[in-house]
Amino acid sequence: MLNKLIVKILPLMPEKLVWQFSKRYVAGSTLGDAIRVSRELNKKGAKVTIDLLGEFITDLGQANENKTTYLNILNAIERNHIDGNVSIKPTFFGLLLDEKTAHDNIAEVVHAANEIGNFVRIDMEDSECTDREIALYKSLFEKYPNAVGLVLQAYLRRTANDITQLAQLNAKGGKVNFRICKGIYIEPEAIAFKGYQEVRDEYLHDLELMLDNGIYAAIATHDKYLIEKAMDMIKSKKTDPSMYEFQMLYGVTPALRDFILAQGHTMRIYVPYGQQWFGYCNRRMKENPGIVTDVMKALFVRN
Ligand SMILES: Cc1cc2nc3c(=O)[nH]c(=O)nc-3n(C[C@H](O)[C@H](O)[C@H](O)COP(=O)(O)OP(=O)(O)OC[C@H]3O[C@@H](n4cnc5c(N)ncnc54)[C@H](O)[C@@H]3O)c2cc1C
């Protein structure tokens, strides 16, 4: 109750105070911050995927700026020998304003990644975007089969079918590569599973479909139950380490992250950065008001 109230008043707090807590979840506001944090994570044995924080854009000029920023991120990853790739949100490239422009913008980023042997992950946004983002992935896969991947959400009722359909792309060469996550948006029951265990069960079903269909699986979760089940599945199927990795968000469940790394699995950390860190952190707290206790600690205890 108290945590929910705090989440409500958080946007009214001075940014400096909120930053004391947020720095655990966000690399910082500049690309230099993202590279510094990525280097630290690389030293711990984790790979990274760098994400530019942002809110919905309202004109294509902003889409163009975001494209340029992503080209700079790829360049910085290369120059600094970072073991990492990038994650993008197609709406930041204009997906809901002008699909063709968004496609061209994203193709330019994927092309640049392909040139340097890097990779672009297309994050999955809310259900208004699902068909569009799958179509975008298919079209980019035709030209850059090793440089682009997609995210699928276990809470969507359609996902198992999408996996079966999209697995057919494997026949075209390259490696079909999906991040499977529970899904973060609020979707209607007509299209989304709602029960906590139901979503977990579906997650494991989707993961099994991916592994059985030769799809590279990026297993994105902090749910210990899912991580243990995924590890069992990988072991029993004798899945080659070149066919999967675990993924987590920066700052979330670091002990579990270290445990997975210690077991010898590949781990990639999603590293968000950007001027818009304030909005991102507010969303994380709305998603999980339990962590507001951490905010309060961070406000009073220096670390
Ligand atoms: C690398 C990565 C990329 C993602 N990309 C997308 C995407 O493209 N589209 C999309 O819809 N969703 C995405 N998500 C979010 C995902 O869909 C879930 O909403 C989120 O990961 C929480 O689900 P969970 O599997 O961790 O399980 P939960 O049951 O939510 O969490 C398990 C435990 O992890 C801890 N935890 C989880 N989240 C947090 C948090 N924010 N802060 C602190 N502790 C936390 C808590 O201890 C919790 O009990 C991504 C998640 C990850 C890890």
Image (tube, rainbow, N blue to C red):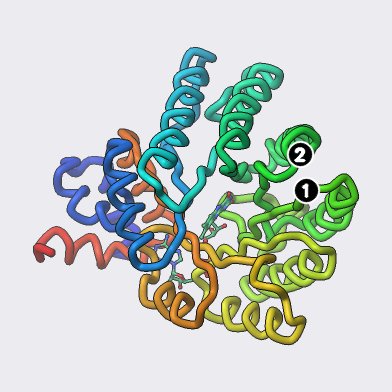
- Please report the residue visible at 51 percent of the width from the left and 43 percent of the height from the top: 86
Residue 43 image position (x, y, % from top left): 33, 63
The local secondary structure at tag 2 comes to helix
Image-based side of 288 in relation to 160, left or right: left
The reply to whether residue 187 is in sight is: yes
> How many numbered discs?
2
- Please report the residue visible at 51 percent of the width from the left and 15 percent of the height from the top: 59
Residue 121 image position (x, y, % from top left): 60, 45
**Vertical placement of 296 versus 55: above or below?**
below
Q: Which mark is residue 141?
A: 2
Bin the neighbour count of mark 1 within 10 Å (Cα to Cα): few under 14, some 14-19, many 20 and up: some
Q: Which mark is residue 8?
A: none
The answer to the question of whether label 2 and label 1 lie on touching residues, with beta carbons closer than 8 A, is yes
Image-based side of 159 in relation to 128, left or right: right
**Vertical placement of 259 versus 33: above or below?**
below
Q: Give the amino acid type for the residue marked by disc 2 in the picture.
A: Phe
The reply to whether residue 195 is in sight is: no
* Residue nearest the viewer, comparing 108 with 98: 108
Mark 2, mark 1: which one is toward the viewer? Answer: 1
Distance between the Cα atoms at labels 2 and 1? 8 Å
* Quarter of the image where the N terminus is located: bottom left
Q: Earlier in the sequence, mark 2 or mark 1?
A: 2
**Vertical placement of 3 versus 12: above or below?**
below
- Please report the residue visible at 63 percent of the width from the left and 23 percent of the height from the top: 102
Bin the neighbour count of mark 2 within 10 Å (Cα to Cα): few under 14, some 14-19, many 20 and up: many
Image-based side of 100 in relation to 45, left or right: right
Residue topped by disc 1: 174
Residue 172 image position (x, y, % from top left): 88, 45
